[in-house]
């Protein structure tokens, strides 16, 4: 068998620095480290991908819900606009038996009254149709309950002996320069 020649001097010192024996033992930990790092990276990528997919599904569901709620809001706004229209308000007021107001009177900051207040005139039966019975939906059940229209006061007839109640007197306008009294202060 052949024996390796012995090295002397500088060559011997350099030979001591090089590893002795098979090179497989030095490569095994490095290969295992690389495999573990690659496997861990793949697992982290799979987890990130699945969490992004889950977030994407949640985002699409929230967008769908937002669209539905926006459509519902627009529908409700159309209903509110329909109820707030002047002709709808006038029709509803007539159905409730309301009448247009009389002449207004205004109070100045110094307490004087401007204008002569007038009472609202009772409409004739020809001008406005009689109020119809309204149906009110019960919130507890889907049963409609008819509501009777308001009963107008009886017309005074000649057989009644009681005099009609006096009409409230209009307050005369205050003289400018004279102090006015106000009640409740």
Image (cartoon, rainbow, N blue to C red):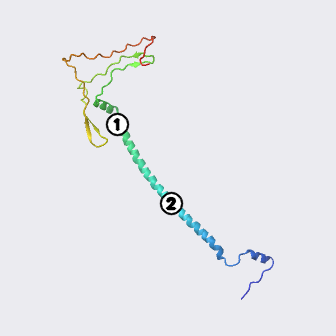
Question: Which residue is at the far left?
Answer: 159
Q: Residue 129 in the image: state x and y as whole percent.
A: 24, 29
Residue picked out by circle 1: 82
Between 181 and 85, the one nearer to me in the picture: 181
Q: Residue 88 in the image: state x and y as whole percent.
A: 32, 33
Residue 49 - label: 2
Tell me if residue 105 comes above or below residue 139 in the rendering. above
Q: Mark 2 Cα within 10 Å, few/some/many (few <14, many 20+)?
A: few
Q: Residue at x 43, y 52 (%)?
A: 61
Q: Residue at x 41, y 45 (%)?
A: 70
Tell me if residue 32 comes above or below residue 144 in the rendering. below
Q: Residue at x 54, y 65 (%)?
A: 42
Q: Quadrant of residue 143?
A: top left
The quadrant of the rendering that contains the N terminus is: bottom right
Check disc 1 and report its element: helix, strand or loop: helix
Between 84 and 162, the one nearer to me in the picture: 162
Tag 1 or tag 2, which sits nearer the N-term? 2
């Amino acid at each position: 068998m052949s024996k390796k020649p012995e090295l002397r001097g500088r060559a011997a010192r350099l030979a001591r620095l090089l590893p002795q024996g098979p090179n497989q033992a030095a490569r095994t930990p490095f290969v295992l480290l690389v495999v573990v790092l690659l496997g861990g990276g793949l697992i982290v990528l799979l987890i990130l991908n699945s969490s992004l997919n889950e977030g994407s599904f949640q985002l699409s569901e929230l967008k769908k819900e937002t669209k539905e709620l926006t459509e519902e809001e627009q529908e409700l706004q159309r209903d509110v606009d329909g109820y707030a229209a002047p002709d709808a308000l006038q029709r509803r007021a007539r159905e409730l038996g309301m009448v247009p107001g009389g002449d207004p009177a205004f109070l100045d900051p110094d307490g004087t009254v401007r204008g002569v207040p007038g009472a609202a005139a009772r409409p004739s039966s020809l001008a406005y149709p009689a109020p119809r019975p309204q149906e009110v939906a019960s919130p507890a059940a889907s049963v409609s309950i008819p509501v009777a229209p308001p009963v107008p006061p009886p017309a005074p007839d000649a057989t009644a002996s009681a005099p009609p109640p006096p009409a409230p007197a209009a307050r005369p306008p205050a003289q400018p320069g004279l102090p006015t009294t106000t009640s409740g202060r």
